[in-house]
Image: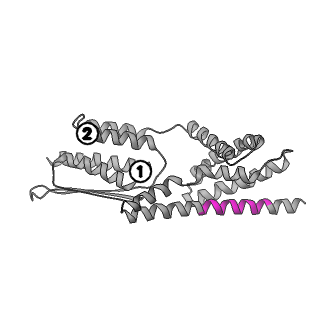
Amino acid sequence: MRKKHKKIVEVATTAGRIMLESHAESYRVEDTVRRILQTSGLSNTEVITNTTGLYVTLDDSDPEIEGITLVRRITDRSNQLNKIYRVNNISRQLTSGQITIDEAAERLEVVDDSDYTVFSKDLATVILVVAFVVLLGGGFWDSVFSIFTGLLVAYSRILKDLFHLNDFIYGVASTLVTAFLTNVIASVVPLDISTDVIIIGGLMPLYPGTAVTNGLRDMLKGDYISGVARVADAIVIALSLAIGVAIGLYFYGEVTSWLV
């Protein structure tokens, strides 16, 4: 019996971890994990989540049943709405009796291993940058030039992977390079280009909009610790982007004055 209960806790914890790493709201994660735990039939199911941790307990009023607690540290977070959707579907199928706990574990493993290809991520980043430049009123040549800026933003991940940068340092480094090179190349191209609009468009894929939205939703749901943590995380990242742009523009100004 304990082996079965442990399997349920492991499946529930895996589902919760995948959702948290995919930027799901805390209340949604807790609800999904709790529903999976309740398939055990035990009376005590407790789940606590925040941006960096998941705490799961399964217990019962029967003293002969030993409680089980699992803790998972959440370190990697990215926007993966498809994973959240697929985990929710698996949870519904499990709680309705359509699949067994072993089948749920296998399907969660497939979801956990799935990811967008590097090419699709880079392509989406470039398209997003161009779209925001158009949305902000950029002209034709601004839109064309923003493809280069989008590539800079997309391939700045190489810096993160190469030097194992945390989110703050990565935000500073990526926007510094983007702001500096965008201005340098725009200054030598004989075209009327709005570098401000292009740089702002380049910031959009890096801005933690999902974290802000989910943080506010968590606070409105009463999950104040998780909500404040998400908003604080978003503020730190947004601050890093602002610092990176400021340093990049400063370096560009220094280089320009030196050449003149």
Instruction: Give the residue pinned by disc 2.
Output: 94
Which segment did they paint magenta?
A: 239-252
User: In which quadrant of the rendered view does residue 126 lie?
Assistant: top right
On the image, the x and y values in percent for residue 10 come to: 28, 48
Q: Residues within 10 Å of mark 2 (few under 14, many from 20)?
A: some
Instruction: Give the residue pinned by disc 1.
Output: 24
Q: Residues within 10 Å of mark 1 (few under 14, many from 20)?
A: many
Q: Is residue 69 left or right of residue 43?
A: right
Q: Is residue 52 left or right of residue 163?
A: left
What's the CA distance linking mark 1 and mark 2? 20 Å
Q: Is residue 62 left or right of residue 154?
A: left
The amino acid pointed to by label 1 is: Ala
On the image, the x and y values in percent for residue 93 come to: 27, 37
Looking at the image, which is closer to me, 217 or 5? 217
Mark before the other along the chain sequence, 1 or 2:
1
- For the point 40% across and 52% down, the residue is 20
Looking at the image, which is closer to me, 54 or 39? 39
User: In which quadrant of the rendered view does residue 113 lie?
Assistant: top left
* Residue 220 sits above or below residue 112 on the image: below
Q: Is residue 71 left or right of residue 39?
A: right
Q: Secondary structure at mark 2?
A: helix
On the image, the x and y values in percent for residue 107 come to: 33, 36
Report the number of numbered marks. Answer: 2
